[in-house]
Amino acid sequence: MTPMIEAAGLVKRFGDFTAVDGIDVTVQPGESFGFLGPNGAGKSSTMRMIGCVSPPTDGLLRILGMDPVRQGPAIRARLGVCPQLDNLAPDLTVLQNLTTYARYFGIPRREARRRATELLEFVQLSERSGAEVEPLSGGMKRRLTIARALINEPDLVLLDEPTTGLDPQARHLVWERLFRLKQRGVTLVLTTHYMDEAEQLCDRLVVMDAGKIVAEGSPRALIERYSTREVVELRFQAESQSGFAAKLEGIGERTEELPDRILLYASDGDAALTEVHARGLSPSGALIRRSSLEDVFLHLTGRTLVD
Amino acid sequence: MIVALALPRLAASGTRVVAVAGRNVVALRSVGWLAFVSGALEPFLYLFSIGIGVGTLVGDMRLADGSVVSYAAFVAPAMLAASAMTGALTETTFNFFGKMKFWKLYDSVLATPVGPMEIAFGELCWAMTRGALYSASFLAVMVAMGLTGPLSALAALPATVLIGFAFGAVGMLVATYLRGWQDFDLIGTIQFALFLFSGTFVPAEAYPAVVRWVIEVTPLYRAVDLIRAITAGGLGWFQVLDVAYLLTLLGLCLWGASRRMSRLLRR
Ligand SMILES: Nc1ncnc2c1ncn2[C@@H]1O[C@H](COP(=O)(O)OP(=O)(O)O)[C@@H](O)[C@H]1O
Ligand SMILES: [Mg+2]
């Protein structure tokens, strides 16, 4: 089967600044694939190259088996793109935003209307069909942008930070809709700096930092490989924290020191915490949780995903 | 063979151009009817105030071919050409610029199979459809007032469309260079200077030779010359030059605008 996306040594430079620094990525049909990384990692630059709106500076890129530079229109006809910033038309109604967009794909008027109505149903915006776009909430706009990306029944859907800036409830609604798409077998490629989003939606992901891929795998495999099963988060009175890290030596596998807390990595969090207390240390707060992709990122780069 | 291969692609491209133009019709339905109608009024205001008002003081005008016409008949074609220019420039600078830089409209369009050239051409077609409606209404009034004949008016309509296309392409190219709304004052001033000095109210022959030459190479002068020859009389070889001039302007600016758009939006 032809991969949906095939990139080898892909590079994007702006002037002499390298935003994407030679990445290798393959995405198979039906997969849900994610780029996880902090702001400035090069996720959007990569997505724009995949979306055939930004020519690669170097390297090989094949989308749906085609060359994005020479066959851009043919590729874009089969892509659905939800950009990082909503760019809905403020002078059109909710429904018109979808029907006019359909026309760019050469979809006949009647069919455009039928699909638009169906998609508004799907993203739960039917009641707003005739309304203007501007007064919509952030979550509604995002859902409308996602609906717009689906108007041409794309083989490959690109979502650049689909839920950044949304409140938790709005995020869950978006996740739930994206999960349905995934179940229908649509290939999803998304970027995010939320580890819970990546864990929820991605079968497989790459961790990106400063234009490079630093790890690749399923969320679970990444956690197993780069972190322990559990983490103990210890908080101390701010000024005295630095002294404590040394005193934790030997408990669990390793520690990470953050400005406001120390993370203690151990397969058994309870046992580790008991040991902390046994050494006569009394943190002002202690929390045991499962390892997440956040810990993977921290381990790989020494920094947190969201600052 | 090559034609057989090219035709479906051309048809698909045509559909996309129509889609870009058609978006404006949809938008018009929801908001802009008033603006649409008010745009048609301006040339009439000038025609009535200056063509007829000032015309009673000026008397008749002698054209290049020696024929004599009323001042209103002299001014009317210039107003028509100027309004074709203004309409096209407004649509392609203000609206095109706003859509490109502030709404980021074309970012979303370029994510579809539609390309920069198709956007440029589609927006231009829309500007022209609108301009042609304005021109037709003005020509109808000219005929009703006896300022030109019905056949001349019919012949002038495609000429106004050509003028609109040419200035629309200029406006689009200019829009890709604009930094912000402050630049519009400059455009307005240039436009007004063209409007005043392009043989609109006074024949270019009235100016000193050097100024006259400068005037005669400006695009609005060529446009006025073309329309005036059609509606007032004196059609000749010079008008072939006018048409060639406007076509060249159209081609160059359209090409330039789509290239600039690629560079700005496809980084
Ligand atoms: N058009 C551009 N011109 C110059 N620099 C850019 C441009 N787009 C992105 N960059 C830079 O490239 C880097 C990566 O940006 P981006 O791909 O948007 O990262 P992310 O989406 O992961 O936050 C950033 O440092 C950004 O400033
Ligand atoms: Mg980004």
Image: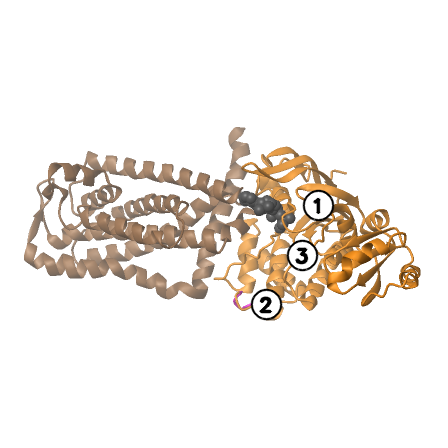
Chain colours: A orange, B brown
Main SS, magenta residues:
loop
Q: In this view, does B195 lie above or below A288?
A: above
Q: Residue furthest top?
A: B1
**Host chain of mark 1:** A
User: Left or right of A142: which side holds B35?
Assistant: left
Query: In the rendered view of the protein, which quadrant contains the C terminus of chain B?
Result: top right
The amino acid pointed to by label 1 is Met
Q: Can residue A220 be seen in this view?
A: yes
Tell whether position A216 is magenta. no
Structural crowding at the residue carrying mark 3, measured as other residues with C-alpha within 10 Å and reported as few (<14), some (14–19) or many (≥20): few
State the SS at label 3.
Answer: loop
The amino acid pointed to by label 3 is Asp
In this figure, which residue is indicated by the disc labeled 3?
Answer: A307
Q: Earlier in the sequence, mark 1 or mark 2?
A: 2
Q: Is residue B247 above or below residue A285?
A: above
Structural crowding at the residue carrying mark 1, measured as other residues with C-alpha within 10 Å and reported as few (<14), some (14–19) or many (≥20): many
Mark-to-mark CA distance, 1 and 3: 16 Å
Q: Where is residue A147 in the image (x, y as percent from the top left)?
A: 63, 58
Pair 2/3: label in front:
3
Q: Where is residue B59 in the image (x, y as percent from the top left)?
A: 6, 54
Q: Earlier in the sequence, mark 1 or mark 3?
A: 1
Residue drawn at x 65%, y 62% is A118
Mark-to-mark CA distance, 2 and 3: 25 Å
- Determine contact: label 1, label 3, CB under 8 Å: no
> What range of the chain is rendered magenta?
A129-133
Query: Which numbered dot is residue A137?
Result: 2
Q: Which residue lies furthest to the bottom in this view?
A: A127
Q: Where is residue B3 in the image (x, y as percent from the top left)?
A: 51, 31
Q: Which of marks 2 and 3 is nearer the N terminus?
A: 2
- Determine contact: label 2, label 3, CB under 8 Å: no
State the SS at label 1.
Answer: strand
In this figure, which residue is indicated by the disc labeled 1?
Answer: A208
